[in-house]
Amino acid sequence: MNTPTYDEAAIEPHRELNRTSAPYPDGSSVKELFERCAARRPEAIAVIHRGTVVSYAELNRLANCLADRLRKDGLRPGQTVGVSLDRSVELIVALLAVVKCGAAYLPFDASWPDERLNGLLESAGCAQVLTRQRSTLTERLSRHRVTPVDRDLLRGNPPDPDVRISPDDIAYINFTSGSTGRPKGVPIRHRGITRLVFGARYARLGEETTLLQLAPVSFDAATFEIWGALLPGGTCVLYPSAFMRFSELKRVVDTHGVSTVFLTTALFNTLVDEAPRTLENVETILTGGEAHSLTHIAKALDTYGPDRLVSVYGPTECTTFATFYPVRALKPGESSLPIGRPIQNTRAYLVHDGRLCRPGETGEILLAGPGLSPGYLGMPDVTRERFVEYEIDGARQRLYRTGDRAYLSEDGNLVFQGRLDDQVKINGFRIELGEIAHHLGRHPDVKQSHVTVRPHATGGKELLAFVVPTGDHCTAESIREHLRRSLPEYMVPTRIHLADGLPLSATGKVDRRALLATLETHEPTGATS
C-alpha cells in the first residue's frame, strides 16, 4: 500500500471535491430493486419499443419466464451468459432474466469477428448465449449453447426466482480494448449500478423520468440508459432503428416525452451542426466520451439555454460515469470544458510523482468508491497495476488509475489534460492504439506500422494507420480485411496509408507530425479513405 504525500494546500481542496456521500440502496441488488419497483408500480410503463408498450408487471413476468427456463437449463448464480440482441423488448427481458438468476450478462455485438467473440466468451467462462430467433451465432459459436429469445413463447406466470444476490456479486461484464492485443474484461458489481442511478447529481432519475436507450448494449452507456430508467421506476424508450436518423430521433423524443438523453461527443457535435432542434424538448442532454469542442458547446448553449446540458466523464472500470459538469456558460478565454466534479458516492484524486496535487497542478486522475470494478478478468498483473491501494487523509482507499491527466481549477472543477498513454476515445469507444498495432504486426506483408489519430471535421477524431509493406503486392484493402478478421469495425482505421518508411524524430521515436504532413501533400499509392 502506498501513501501519497500532501500538504494542507492539496488535501483541503480534495476534501471539498469529494464531499459526495449520498444515501442509496447499497444493500440491494439489481434483481431486488427491479422486483420491488414492479410490485410497487405494476401498471406503470417500463419499456416502449416501436408500437409495443410493456408495463412493469408484464416485463417482470416475461423476465421470470426466461429466468425459469435458464435455471432449468442449468444456469447457476455466479455464471456468465452472453447476450447478443438488437434493441428490443427481448433485450431487456434477457438482461433482467440473467440477473434474476444471480448470473452476469456479457453483452456483445454479433458483427464482431469470430476470433474476438470466441476469445471474449472463453475468457469470461461463458457457456451460454442468448440471441434472437434464427441467428447465425448457432453456427459460429459451436462450443456454446445458443438460446433464442422470443417473448411470444414466454408463457406462464412463475414467481420471482428465489435467488439470494449480494450487492457485491457481478451483474455484467464489458470488454474494452487492450494494448497487448487482448481485450480486457471489466466485471461490474450490482453495487456499482445502484450507486450510478440512485441519488443522481447529474440528472433527475425517478418515476417521472423517460430515458432514451440509444447506445449499443455492449457500450457501457447502455448501463445508465437501461437501469437509470428501470430501477428508479421510470420508462425506458428503446430507439426503434439500428441506425440513428435525426428526423426519427426527434419523432421518438417528442412522441414519448423523453426527458433524458445521452449522446457521445461525436454524435452530439453532428447533431448540433445539422439538426440542433431535434432535442429542443428534452429536459437533460448528457454528452461525453471525448474532449468537447467549445464551438459546438457554445452553439448548444445558444440553442438549449443553461441548465439542460451536462458533460459527463468516466471509464468503464468505474461504472459508466465518474464526474459531471453542468454547462451553464462558457467563461471568457476558456480553452477546454471542465469534466467537473465527482458524481454521488464517487471520489477523485489527482496524483503526480507520489504526491497529491494542489489546485492548478496536473496529475493522474484516480477514482474511488463503490462503482469500481473488482479488476480485470484473468489479468492479475494488469489489475495490480491499475487498481491500487493508497492511504489518503488517514483512510485506506482502493483506487483506479485512469491514465487520464487533469488539474483542479480554482473553482473546484477537474479539467481534462489528455492521456498518459496511447489510449483514445472515438465515438465513445475506448481504443488502445497498441491493440491495433499488435494486429497490424501479425499481417505477413507488414514490415512496420504506426497508428494514430487526427481531428475530424465533426469535432471528433479519426483513426489513421501508416504501414510500411514488405513489397508491392501489399494493398491497403488487404490490410483492412486482415484487421476486420480480428477487430470490431470501430477499431479498423478509417484511412490506411502505405509508406516507404516511418520518419523518426531526433529522439528516435516515430515523427507523428511528419507523417500527418504527408497527407497534406499527397496520397501514397494504394492508400484508401
Image: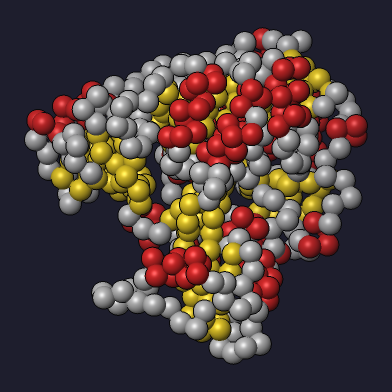
* The quadrant where residue 339 appears: top left
The one of 209 and 425 positioned closer to us in this rendering: 425
Residue 253 visible in the displayed image? yes
Horizontal arrangement in the rendering, residue 351 relative to residue 369 (left or right): left
Percent of width and height locating residue 312: 45, 32
Residue 67 visible in the displayed image? no
Q: Residue at x 38, y 18 (%)?
A: 22
Is 512 above or below relative to 267? below
Q: Residue at x 71, y 45 (%)?
A: 83
The one of 90 and 75 positioned closer to us in this rendering: 90
Is 400 above or below relative to 320? below
Return the residue found at the far bottom. 471
Q: Residue at x 79, y 52 (%)?
A: 146
Is 472 above or below relative to 130? below
Image color mode: secondary structure
**Count of all numbered marks drawn on residues in the image:** 0
Return the residue found at the far left. 7
Percent of width and height locating residue 519: 51, 67
Percent of width and height locating residue 116: 64, 63
Is 145 above or below relative to 366? below
Q: Residue at x 62, y 88 (%)?
A: 472
Percent of width and height locating residue 389: 27, 45
Return the residue found at the far front. 521
The one of 266 and 156 positioned closer to us in this rendering: 266
Q: Quadrant of the C terminus?
A: bottom right
